[in-house]
Image (cartoon, rainbow, N blue to C red):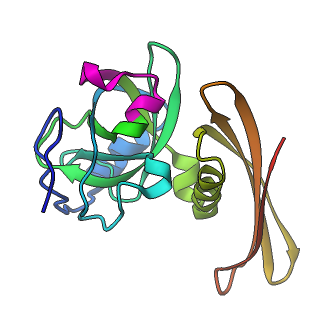
């Protein structure tokens, strides 16, 4: 049912574990700084224990170690220190007992960092994306933006503002930096939703 990693550790699926206070403290500690680690790559399998396909978010996906404090659906910002390229990936699976600083990226995410898959292993720096974790609508707009610009990769984000245009409406705005082979652009995403029902009233994305 599961495929094997081309490099690194066998792909065995996701094994849940308690998210302890120690892990939470560890995560808060590293939020401010990049951690050093290694990235490998995979083509992914048809099934993940997170129930998120590897194709999610234009293949900007990854698996982390079962020893890592990060969990399913969390977003990580991954940087290639050799060329400065960054991407934001969503965790879709884990690798049992791999080193905590190892991240297995989908091949497209690996290549988006400017790395040739033939090297197998890439030295990286990474950190969780706290703003997107705390603001689910930021993640929602990230996914919309990534889908709307399939030849670009989201490399950074900025929360702009949150307002209440009506008693039953909340409006949130985020700016995203996107990078392609040829250019870098900025896209503003806006969502208006009902805070009671959590239903989207409208959303909009536009280049700045």
Q: Quadrant of residue 38?
A: top left
* Res. 17 in view: yes
From the viewer's perspective, is residue 121 above or below residue 89?
above
At horizontal 52% and vertical 47% (from top left) the residue drawn is 130
User: Does 28 lie within the magenta span?
Assistant: no
At horizontal 45% and vertical 17% (from top left) the residue drawn is 81
Residue 149 as seen in the image, left or right of residue 68? right
Q: Position of residue 102 (x, y in %)?
A: 24, 34
Q: Position of residue 157 (x, y in %)?
A: 65, 42
At horizontal 36% and vertical 52% (from top left) the residue drawn is 91
Q: Position of residue 155 (x, y in %)?
A: 58, 35
Q: Which quarter shows the C terminus?
A: top right
Residue 168 as seen in the image, left or right of residue 122? right
At horizontal 19% and vertical 59% (from top left) the residue drawn is 14
Residue span colored magenta: 110-123
Residue placed most toward the observer, 156 or 117: 117
Q: Position of residue 18 (x, y in %)?
A: 22, 62
As drawn, which residue projects farthest toward the top?
82
User: Does 118 lie within the magenta span?
Assistant: yes
From the viewer's perspective, is residue 35 above or below residue 24?
above
Q: Quadrant of residue 123?
A: top left
Residue 170 as seen in the image, left or right of residue 152? right
* Res. 30 in view: no
From the viewer's perspective, is residue 84 above or below residue 41?
above
Q: Which quarter shows the N terminus?
A: bottom left
As drawn, which residue projects farthest toward the bottom?
197
Residue placed most toward the observer, 54 or 174: 54
């Amino acid at each position: 049912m599961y495929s094997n990693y081309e490099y690194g550790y066998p792909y065995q699926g996701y094994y849940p574990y308690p998210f302890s206070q120690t892990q939470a403290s560890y995560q808060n500690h590293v939020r401010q700084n990049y951690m050093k680690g290694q990235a490998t790559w995979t083509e992914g399998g048809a099934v993940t224990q997170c129930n998120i396909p590897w194709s999610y978010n234009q293949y900007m996906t990854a698996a982390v170690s079962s020893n890592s404090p990060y969990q399913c659906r969390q977003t990580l910002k991954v940087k290639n220190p050799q060329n400065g390229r960054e991407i934001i990936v969503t965790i879709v699976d884990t690798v049992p007992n791999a080193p905590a600083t190892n991240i297995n990226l989908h091949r497209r995410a690996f290549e988006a960092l400017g790395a040739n898959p033939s090297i197998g292993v890439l030295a990286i720096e990474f950190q969780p994306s706290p703003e997107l974790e705390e603001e689910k609508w930021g993640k929602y707009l990230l996914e919309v933006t990534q889908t709307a610009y399939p030849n670009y990769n989201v490399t950074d984000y900025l929360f702009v503002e949150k307002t209440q245009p009506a008693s039953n409406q909340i409006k949130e705005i985020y700016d995203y930096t996107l990078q392609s082979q040829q250019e870098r652009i900025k896209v503003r995403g806006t969502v208006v939703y009902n805070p009671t029902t959590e239903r989207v009233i409208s959303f909009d994305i536009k280049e700045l």
